[in-house]
Image (tube, rainbow, N blue to C red):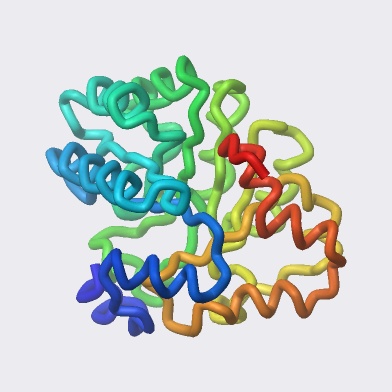
Amino acid sequence: IWRWFETHAWPITYKKYAAAQVVFLKSQGVSQAVSLHYPHKEGMAGALNQFAFELGDKYPGFIIPFGSVHPDDADAEAILRDCFTKFAFKGIKIHCHVQHVAPDDRRMEPIYKVCDENRKIVLIHCGSGPHFKEQPTRGYGYDVTVVSGVRRFEKIVGKYPEITFVVPHLGYEEVEPFIHLLGDYPNLYLDTTMALSRFLPVEVKPSRLAENSDRLLFGTDFPNIPYEWKREKENLLAMGLGKEIEEKIFYRNAARLLDIEE
């Protein structure tokens, strides 16, 4: 993953393995962190989910592991049932760009069905960015905009009301259209990852965050980021949204979704 990022995207600031990552995050005052992964090809999900479970077991009360599955896995439903029964994961992550799957792809139907039955969280990277506009096939080998975007996501968010959907990066590169969806779909949340870092070319108005503060989650993509971890946190605090809203975005909304006792 580091090689891919440094070849096609950006340099990685924190080349740390799991144990060192935990030490660093705790030193920054982080009380809990959700660990996320996704298989880029079929046949990998089982091993990755086992690793995520063991990581959470090693750091109970700090690491909250999510699972994943590849839409081409022949045993996708069985993998998900392991996620929610054997491992007791609270949700899964899907990355449309990497896994070459659109939110409304028919291959996602069995995945949504299991998540819907178990009332789980689906964190799905389905915004069109970041992508390489000048060289659309760079990095991924195809134009990722064909499988992403708010239009394709909206086709499924209302279809599965028992799934809590979380879209990272505030839906970048369609931040305002994704924020607009919050008013129509109470099962939708957005996370702030990289969108408030001033690294991506996007401007987010503080008023829009304040208006939708009950449905926003703080995210970072640590450790695979090209700047200091604290940058996104400090930029959010600098907006002057006030303690109540800041607490919602930094902790309380996530605590509610993840059933964390405060």
List x then y, in percent, for residue 69. 28, 37
Q: Residue at x 24, y 67 (%)?
A: 1
Which image quadrant is residue 170 in? Answer: bottom right
Vertical placement of residue 211 versus 8, above or below: above
Quarter occupied by the C terminus? top right
4 relative position to 109: left or right: left
List x then y, in percent, for residue 59. 36, 52
Vertical placement of residue 75 versus 204, above or below: above
168 relative position to 240: left or right: left
List x then y, in percent, for residue 167. 55, 48
Q: Is residue 99 visible?
A: no
Vertical placement of residue 235 versus 184, above or below: below
Vertical placement of residue 223 versus 151, above or below: below
Which image quadrant is residue 101 in? Answer: top left
85 relative position to 41: left or right: right
Q: Is residue 244 visible?
A: yes
Q: Residue at x 49, y 75 (%)?
A: 27
Q: Nearer the viewer, residue 204 or 132?
A: 204
The residue furthest left is: 43
Q: Nearer the viewer, residue 90 or 210?
A: 90
Q: Nearer the viewer, residue 259 or 6?
A: 259
26 relative position to 215: left or right: left
List x then y, in percent, for residue 45. 21, 40
Q: Residue at x 64, y 73 (%)?
A: 233
Which image quadrant is residue 97 in? Answer: bottom left
